[in-house]
Image (cartoon, grey):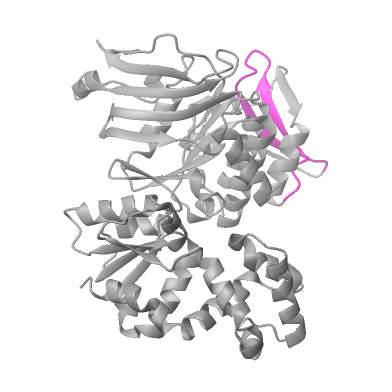
Amino acid sequence: MKLSPNQVSEELTRIAQNNYHRLVKRVMLHHVRGIREQTIEFRYPVTALIGTNGGGKSTILGSVALAYKNVKPAQFFPKAFRGDETMADWFVEYELIDKQAAPQRNLARTARFAQSKWRRNDFLERPVEYIEIQRTVPAGELAKYRKFIGAIDGDAEINELSQDTIIYAGAVLDKDVTNYRTANRANDPDNKIYIYESPEHGYSQFHFGAGEASIIATIDRIENCENNSLVLIEEVENGLHPVAVRLFVQYLQHVARRKRLQIIFTTHSQDAVDELPAEAIWATINRHLFNGQLSVESLRTITGQEIQNRIVFVEDDFVCEWVKSAIGWHRPLLMAQTRVEKAGGYPNLITVCEYHNRNPIIDTPAVALVDGDVMQDGVVLPDCARFIGEGVPESIVFDFIFDNRVDIISLIRQRCLLAGFSEQEIIAALEGVRNAAVDPHVVFTALSERLGFHSALHIRSGFIDLFNERNAEFWGECLDFVEELV
């Protein structure tokens, strides 16, 4: 069910090349609620919206829904009789892909709230499935299920779940869902309740666990929606165990690829975010939008909820570990005073760092350490940033270990926990990876495969540890820059 790196890359390329039948490609929020002059681009079929409470996640979700005329605006942006006077200035622009309406070009549309009504001229239709937060509320508390309370009469219809729903709901829940069914009144086929029936016993959705009901119903709705639909999900992790959250986000990517869906969800779960590429993650912080590999935890840093003397923003997990290890080796007194957070690739981490430093409620200064490979593009960094080395970080570390492999092979074996392999086997694996010209971003995975699938994380940590131990001069300027923040 989990997409391979190649499949993820294919999906990113497909959207970059506008090779989708229907897609909301870009939304420009000129003024909606408190969001002004912010743009979000959808670069992957599944997008996660993370952010602080009140930061604007649901505003973005609703704004995307408004791109299609069959969606009622009041479902997302109702207007009260008093207090909503500023809605008169709301204004959203869209860039849409619709191969049926315009095979050779993207379409531009504008939505304005004027004279107490949304004006959406010449907007297109598209199937939209909105999976609301109420999906985890106990069935007995929702009005739509109350008609199912009481004696069963003769007008009930019982239907099997589709085979795809059985397969994928079972995979996420890690249980057999073959005996689950749906029940509805014959005169109301769209309003249904889920039931479990087996020769031994049976029970209805009134007695399901919240996560169980949510997963089965949500996957059933997605599997039954039309290809090329837009699916919007509020708080994807609601009611789910962290393992189920990861499996569910894997499923969302799988079904988006299989049915050519566009799926957008809000979340506060790091488990959900970790399953997606950086291009698929957008953070809303105080109604500003940032794209990249921001973590849910890093939001606390950006908004000033974490108290340290200094903050260092880097691009990804590898550099985060690399920098933390370097501080531990060469400036140990900084360890308790410095927080290192990933904030996505260049130029996103610069944007995040500058936003942090402009925030008037934050006294903690921040810097950005940028991967050195973008130096080749003539990039000039602002005062708050420095380059780390002059190449791809993984290559810098791997090349040092490779060049010194003979002299430090016993340490490689020890630090990478490779006691089950001889020194000759480890050297052969290193040389094999070098000869294969492996992409530097997957070099540790490639080594893992050549060493009996030994943990790539152990190999990575061992290489980082050895590099930092022996390269104090390499880190001198960067760590001086960090230390001088305070």
Identify the image quadrant of residue 422.
Answer: bottom right
Residue 367 in which image quadrant: bottom left
The foreground one among 125 and 208 is: 125
Residue 373 percent location from the top left of the image: 47, 59
In terms of image quadrants, where is residue 178? Answer: top right
Q: Residue at x 28, y 32 (%)?
A: 37
Name the quadrant of the C terminus. Answer: bottom left
Question: Residue 285 versus residue 379: which sits nearer the camera?
Answer: 379
Judge whether residue 184 is colored magenta.
yes
Span of residues in magenta: 175-199
On the picture, is 140 further left or further right than 363?
Answer: right
Give how far across and how far down residue 96 sits, in percent.
Answer: 48, 23
Determine whether, in the image, residue 21 is placed left or right of residue 201: left
The residue located at (58%, 73%) in the rendering is 399
Decide whether residue 19 is among the magenta residues: no
Work out whether residue 3 can be spotted: no
The image shows a total of numbered marks equal to 0
Q: Is residue 19 visible?
A: yes
Q: Position of residue 236 (x, y in %)?
A: 51, 43
Q: Position of residue 384 (x, y in %)?
A: 26, 60
Q: Is residue 109 above or below residue 312?
A: above
Q: Does residue 333 appear to the left or right of 45 in the view shown?
A: left
Q: Is residue 27 left or right of residue 425?
A: left
Q: Residue at x 72, y 80 (%)?
A: 426
